Amino acid sequence: MTKGKLQKTAENLEFTRRILTNGIWVILLVIILAAIGWYLVQKNLAVELKEDSRAAEESSSVKPVVPAINWGEVDTALAGVLQDAREEARQYAEAELDIWIASLMERIDESFLDWYFSYWTQQMLGLKGLYQYGVHYVIQKQPTASEKLTEEIQEEFLQRVLRPQIAQRVLERIINETATRYILVLKVGLNEIPQTYSISRADWQSYLEDIAITTKDSEAARQTPLTLKALTVSTTGGALLLAGSIKGLVTQAGSKVLTKSSGKVASSMAAKTGGKVVAKAGGKFFGTIAGFGVLIWDIWDHDATERENRPFLRNSLAEYLGELKSILLDDPEYGIMATFSSMEHEIVEKSHGSSASPRP
């Protein structure tokens, strides 16, 4: 029994040893296989990282292809921006001039025409015409009656309707605000161009600097060299420069229009006044008895003349103010828009010359 138990115990120990031995070998095998697996994973990861690094280096060494800027299209876009700014300025100036002229027409209706067609005004003009008729008859170098009366009527029209000092302030305000409107629209349009054509800030600033123009200060009789960048970098500064170029022109335009008016409006008034002079001169030689009859005829004639000629004279004055507006706005030599048009032409020419030279 004892021998059997010892044998069984020995067998159990041998079985346990084998299990432990096999377990240890299994564990060692698993460890070895796991180690091999991690080795292979790390080796593969190292290869991938190396390839990724090489690819990144290659990618960073290849510069992206940037399409070349078509500066001809940029020049065309600039011309369009200048045109838009000019049209916006013109519409604004025209609207403000219309408001001003409407106020002048109110003064024509409420002051000048009432003065001109007043019975006593007509008598005074008749007497002055008679006096000037005699002076010119004796001294041929003196103005004729029609010329003298035309001058006096023009002066009355200036004081009652145009009021030069007030008109000057109104026109200066219109000029300043028009120039500011022009610069604002120009600045907004210029800011959009580099975004549209993917122009770098440095290239765009260089482009604007290359376009040098000359602004003319009509009042100071001097010229100021200026780049397109400097013109628009400060809205207020650019507007002041342009306004200075325009003010002197408008002052000259006023003289030009007044000179023209003598051949249009004042001529019709002088012709009517001339008729009065003849009536007065004819009545004079009839003596005091005939004079009373002339006075009665004159009252009747005044009423008829006003009914017939007041609408005609008003239309003539409206045409005159329309001509004034046209000259102030569009005259190529004196008009408000002349400065913008001249500057636009110069900028377009300079931009084509600038874009013709190579750029980075």
Image (cartoon, rainbow, N blue to C red):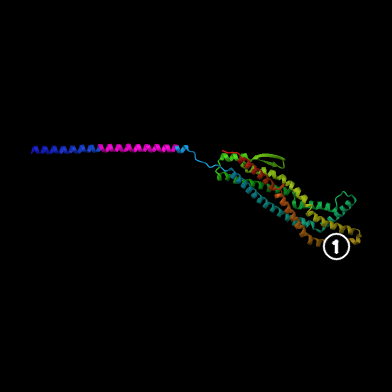
141 in the magenta segment: no
**Which residue is depicted at the point 81% across and 62% down?**
304
Residue 283 is situated, as x and y percent measured from the top left of the image, at 89, 59
Q: Where on the picture, by quarter, is residue 22?
A: top left
Residue pointed to by mark 1: 297
Q: Where on the picture, by quarter, is residue 24?
A: top left
| Range drawn in magenta | 28-57
Residue 311 is situated, as x and y percent measured from the top left of the image, at 76, 60
Q: Where on the picture, by quarter, is residue 4?
A: top left
The residue lying toward the viewer, choosing from 166 and 151, is 151
Identify residue type, mark 1: Trp
In this view of the protein, can residue 317 be seen by the observer?
yes
Image height of 27 relative to 135, above or below: above
Which image quarter holds the N terminus? top left
Label count reads: 1
Q: 57 left or right of 326? A: left
Q: What is the residue that sits farthest to the left in this orientation? A: 1
Which image quarter holds the C terminus? top right
34 in the magenta segment: yes
The residue lying toward the viewer, choosing from 319 and 349, is 349
**Which residue is depicted at the point 66% across and 48% down?**
178
Residue 253 is situated, as x and y percent measured from the top left of the image, at 74, 48
In this view of the protein, can residue 185 be seen by the observer?
no
The residue lying toward the viewer, choosing from 16 and 33, is 33
Secondary structure mostly seen in the magenta stretch? helix
Image height of 213 relative to 272, above or below: above
* Crowd tier of the residue under label 1, counting other residues whose Cα lies within 10 Å: few below 14, some 14–19, many 20 or above: few
Residue 321 is situated, as x and y percent measured from the top left of the image, at 73, 53
Q: What element carries label 1?
A: helix
